[in-house]
Image (cartoon, rainbow, N blue to C red):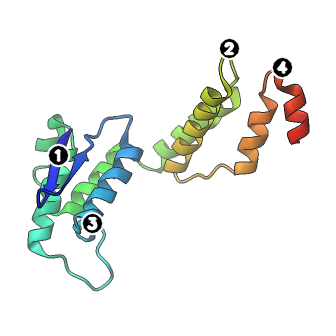
Amino acid sequence: MSLVKEGGSMAYQVPVLTLRNYPVSAVKVKSIMDAHDIWETVEPKAGETSDQKKSKKALAFLFQAIPEDMVLQMASYTEPKKVWDRLKTRYLGVDRVRTTRLAMLKRELESLRMKEGETVDDFVTKLSDLASKTRSLRYELEEGDLVKRLLDLMPKSFLQIVASIE
């Protein structure tokens, strides 16, 4: 990870994209760019034109966030929005890929079972992770369904607790 410093008082770590971390990395990058007041170059408000200096800063920031092997592929883009859109397309994919990934996550959710000796916290973390992944693909799992799933998959030793919660 590289560091971006603002006036020497605050440092932000720029997460480098990988095949597996795009959703989380995108949120972090957007947040840091917003803190540096350069996010508007990626998603300008209606009727506004972006400042050339901010645009160059945003472009440099995005180039820090991409893997080294992609830098030359993106080097021809001179606007931060084009780099961002290209990354989004590459990592999230087109709708067919997104739909396929979503179907795989739903199957994983359906086959998820609490293993013997696994703590409730570990299992809830797995369940939350799957919910976050589906959310990153623009599909929201209902909280009630997740709770029901959790209660249904509790081991028999938790039966009395589950019954009292239900």
Tell us which disc is closer to us: 2 or 3: 2
Type of the residue with mark 2 = Gly
Q: Are marks 2 and 3 in contact (CB under 8 Å)?
A: no
Earlier along the polypeptide chain: callout 2 or callout 3?
3
Relative image position of residue 111 (x, y in whole percent): 68, 26
The answer to whether 86 is drawn above or below residue 41 in the figure is above
- Does residue 138 appear to the left or right of 43 in the view shown? right
Q: Residues within 10 Å of mark 4 (few under 14, many from 20)?
A: few
Q: Residue placed at 23% from the left, 60% from the top?
A: 82
Q: Residue placed at 14% from the left, 67% from the top?
A: 55
Classify mark 3: helix, strand or loop. Answer: helix
Residue placed under numbered mark 1 in the picture: 3
What separation in Å lies between label 4 and label 1 (alpha carbons)? Answer: 48 Å
Relative image position of residue 151 (x, y in whole percent): 79, 34
Type of the residue with mark 4 = Ser
Relative image position of residue 66 (x, y in whole percent): 21, 43
Classify mark 2: helix, strand or loop. Answer: loop
Residue placed under numbered mark 3 in the picture: 39
Residue placed under numbered mark 2 in the picture: 117
The answer to whether 3 is drawn above or below residue 56 in the figure is above
What separation in Å lies between label 2 and label 1 (alpha carbons)? Answer: 41 Å
Q: What label sits on residue 157 in the rendered view?
A: 4
Q: Nearer the viewer, residue 40 or 124?
A: 124
Q: Residues within 10 Å of mark 3 (few under 14, many from 20)?
A: many
What separation in Å lies between label 3 and label 4 (alpha carbons)? Answer: 50 Å
Q: Are marks 4 and 1 in contact (CB under 8 Å)?
A: no
Q: Where's the N terminus, which quadrant?
A: top left
Q: Nearer the viewer, residue 36 or 10?
A: 10
Earlier along the polypeptide chain: callout 3 or callout 1?
1
